[in-house]
Image (spheres, rainbow, N blue to C red):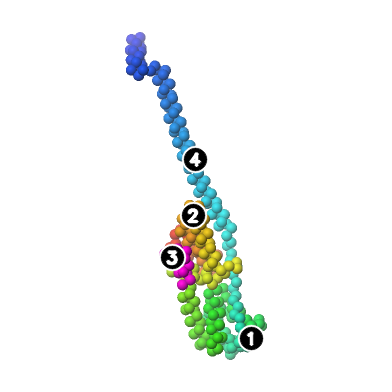
Amino acid sequence: QQEAEAIVHEVQSQLEKVAGLTAAEAREQLVESLKNEAQLQASSYIKDTVAQAKLTATKDAKKVVLETIQRTASEHAIENCVSVFNIESDDVKGKIIGREGRNIRALEAATGVEVIVDDTPEAIIISGFDPVRREIARLSLHLLVKDGRIHPARVEEIVAKTTKKIEEEIIEIGERTVIDLGIHGLHPELIRMVGRMRFRSSYGQNLLQHSREVANLCATMAAELGLNVKHARRAGLLHDIGKVSTEEPELPHAILGMEMAKKYKEHPDVVN
């Protein structure tokens, strides 16, 4: 055993001589090296943790902002369901009504609105939920009164021409709007819905003008938050299309709009 210890001591002495260090010094350097390595690893871990925390905080902050905006948006629409057609004289009312009310019935059947001729001076009330139908009825009445020939066949003819003109105008308005906003690839039916917003008001503001403003506001916010600007602008423009939908009007307009966007293959971010 003494001989073995002597050999170990000799080997240790030779190693210390080659390394130029005593065993104590070697241990000290090893400890220092491990300490430095541990500090570097700890520093790297802290840096990564802080970076991840900042990223998570940014995402959470964006989520809070967007959810707050969504919560403050009203879920209910206040819509004026009547239009007024002004006439120069109450004498015109008799012509519009026609014998036994035939002209009025023809106009109501052709447009799908209710035409109310009562004691309101120099005015005829057009009632109906669909603002486009009301506008068709109003313009048709204007043309009929101007022309002077008012009878059921003429009513149907004028309504058909007016409907065609309004539908063309709706598509033109929708196409011009998406071009102005730089939105591409929108389904033709969604473009038509955008055009229909021109004839609708909500809270006293024209719905199309409101939606254009929302589209630009969403794009600006998306740019500030580092989100997809194109998707945000698109979603802003389409956010109220449920208000002009003729499908399942008993559903909330937000749900209707979502279903339409999904139906016409909009991006999930836009649908949401």
Viewer-nearest residue: 72 or 180: 180
Any part of residue 260 in sight: yes
The kind of residue tagged 3 is: Leu
User: Which residue carries the number 3 mark?
Assistant: 186
Q: Which residues are magenta?
A: 172-185
**In percent of the image, x 59 and y 76: which residue is there?**
83
Secondary element type, mark 1: loop
Give whichever of discs 3 and 2 has the lower sequence position.
Answer: 3
Of callouts 4 and 2, which one flags the residue occurring earlier in the amino acid sequence? 4
Identify the disc placed on residue 90: 1
Question: What kind of secondary structure does the magenta stretch mostly adopt?
Answer: helix
Pointer 2 residue: 223
Report the label total. 4
Quickly name the residue at label 4: 50
Residue nearer the viewer, 88 or 25 = 88
Is label 4 in contact with label 3 (beta carbons under 8 Å)?
no
Asked if the residue at tag 4 contacts the one at tag 1, i.e. Cβ–Cβ closer than 8 Å, the answer is: no
How far is disc 4 from disc 3 in space, using C-alphas? Answer: 42 Å
